[in-house]
Amino acid sequence: MATLDDIMIEITPQVLLKAYACGIFPMAESARDNALYWIEPEHRGILPLDNVHVPRSLARTIRRGDFEIKVDNDFAAVIEGCAAPRPGRRSTWINQRIRNLYADLFDLGHCHTIEVWRDDRLIGGLYGVHLGRAFFGESMFSLVRDASKIALVYLVARLIYGGFTLLDTQFVTDHLARFGTVEVDREDFQGLLEDALSDGEGQFSSLPGDMSSSGILQLVSQTSKTGCSTA
């Protein structure tokens, strides 16, 4: 695992996208460490878009609809939320270079946010990178119970509707495993990635903004039953 500084190249958004296309991504040791490291896990987490499980309690919360979903509305606030210390975690891997690089990707239309708002307050969300028909989840946060989970369900619906075939979660956590995230080896991931990058472009913005919460859940559950996605 080499640092980006060791490779002696300027890290631009274009270089970063090429790295994603090769199946690698950057991380930092901590927010205070300015160095970045290329990461290519031997085993990779993916959430198959045709086999997503939404827990019943979460589905009830989503149907209740006491929140508002915004997309690409406030990237700075989302990455700040993802980088903020939380109970049980004093530090984060999101340093200033990460913030700057992904802000540039956001400006170029290759980085997106799903934001959960309530009473004009951002209560949770996630961000990630869009390339071809692949979406690479980077980080999520929650200030109230289930907010990041709501964001994930809305992300999945958007990817399904937009013709995406791969949702990369990088790693498998207990949180993601509940939704059906599985681990694949590096070779299998490379095959999925190649397919996702060689078959057109996913349309991240095609999901109708007025789709109801019940419609979102139906889209996710129907795809899971019929296997419409190829992820």
Image: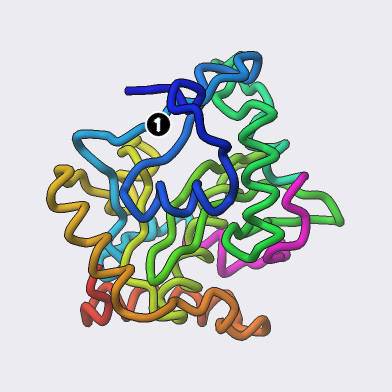
Which residue type does callout 1 highlight? Trp
Q: Which residues are magenta?
A: 59-76
Residue 175: image x %, image y %? 39, 40
How many discs appear?
1
Crowd rating for badge 1 (residues with CA inside 10 Å; few <14, some 14–19, many 20+): some
Q: Nearer the viewer, residue 74 or 216?
A: 74
Camera sees residue 30 = yes
Q: Residue at left 25%, top 67%?
A: 231
Q: Secondary structure at mark 1?
A: strand
Image coords of residue 67 (percent x, y)? 71, 61
Residue at the limit of the structure toward the right, as seen here: 120
185 over 208 or under it: above or below: above
> Mark 1 — residue?
38
Q: Is residue 69 visible?
A: no
- The part of the image, by quadrant, that contains residue 32 is top right
| Residue that appears at 43% across and 78% down | 201
Q: Quadrant of residue 164?
A: bottom left
Quarter holding the N terminus is top left
Residue drawn where x is 69% and y is 29% of the image: 96
Name the spot of residue 82 as percent of width and height, x first: 63, 36
Q: How is the image coloured?
A: rainbow
| Left or right, residue 66 beside residue 186 | right
From the top left corner, tell me how far across and down residue 173 is, in percent.
34, 35
Q: Nearer the viewer, residue 141 or 13?
A: 13
Q: Nearer the viewer, residue 101 or 59?
A: 101
Q: Quadrant of residue 196?
A: bottom left
Examine the structure image and report whether residue 68 is included in the region drawn in magenta.
yes
Between 8 and 107, the one lying in front of the other is: 8
Residue 180 versus residue 227 in the image, above or below: above
Residue 200 falls within the magenta-colored stretch: no
Q: Which residue shows up at 48% across the image and 54% down it?
A: 17
